[in-house]
Amino acid sequence: MTNLDTKDSLPTLGAGVFASGADRGSLAQLDDDCEHPFVRRGMGFKEAGDRLVEAIVSRRARPFLIAPAICFLYRHHLELMLKALIRVYRVLAGSTPAYPEVHNLLELWNELSRLLCQSSGSPMVSGSAEAEACLLALERLDPNGELSRYGVTKKGKATIPRNTRLNLRTMRDLIERTSFFLDSHYSRAHVLLEARREARRNSDYGP
């Protein structure tokens, strides 16, 4: 527990996180890219998770303390990427360009998988089985993100089963491959959208 005997360790009245201060290297611009907000935010969660895993690997952090935070960061990264992909492929399919409101990774994956197959005209998209296995493992570990955010449920039941162990380096590598798969399809979707826009522009100026 934190020792509060030292007065200097307590917050000071009027201290503000929005003040510029002298340490300009610690300033962060919070504006999001309006065209790709979910992807940009999602990649931030992944980078934070990667850096925490690296801190554990290099023995600069305690695994038992920050492992749940790593699970949350990676899980939320994938949730945001899935939602961004679903929205852009809905646009390609001519549907309402809305973000899904669910948090279950498998529900999101099922919707995205359907849209990817519809876009490619193939019943199976290369790499999808590996991505689905990663999402299934995370959803089983942390259904709806409760494990990584809370130590117990509303009923007082532990969210993490006893003797649950994770290889965080393996998790990082698995997330990396799944993230690459999702990001590749996001890029592909925007190439298709740009080609569609270009075709419309050409038709506007056609004979």
Image (spheres, grey):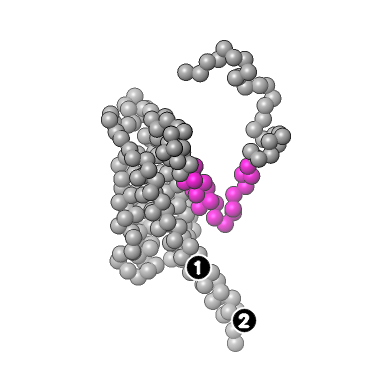
Is residue 44 a member of the stretch shown in magenta?
Answer: yes
The crowd level at tag 1 (other Cα within 10 Å; few <14, some 14-19, many 20+) is few
For disc 1, the marked residue is 191
In the rendering, at what x and y percent does residue 7 appear? 62, 15
- Residue closest to the eye, 20 or 13: 20
Could you tell whether 28 is left or right of 131 in the image? right
Q: Give amino acid for label 2.
A: Tyr
Regarding mark 2 in the picture, which secondary structure is present there?
A: loop
Res 149 visible = no
Q: Looking at the rendered structure, which numbered label has been put on residue 205?
A: 2
Quadrant of res 11: top right
Is residue 48 a member of the stretch shown in magenta?
Answer: yes
Query: Going from the N terminus, do you reach mark 1 or mark 2 first?
Result: 1
Regarding mark 1 in the picture, which secondary structure is present there?
A: helix
- Residue closest to the eye, 155 or 129: 129
State the CA–CA distance, disc 1 to disc 2: 21 Å
- Quadrant the C terminus occupies: bottom right
Question: Residue placed at 30% from the left, 51% from the top?
Answer: 133
Quadrant of res 130: bottom left
Q: Residue furthest bottom?
A: 207
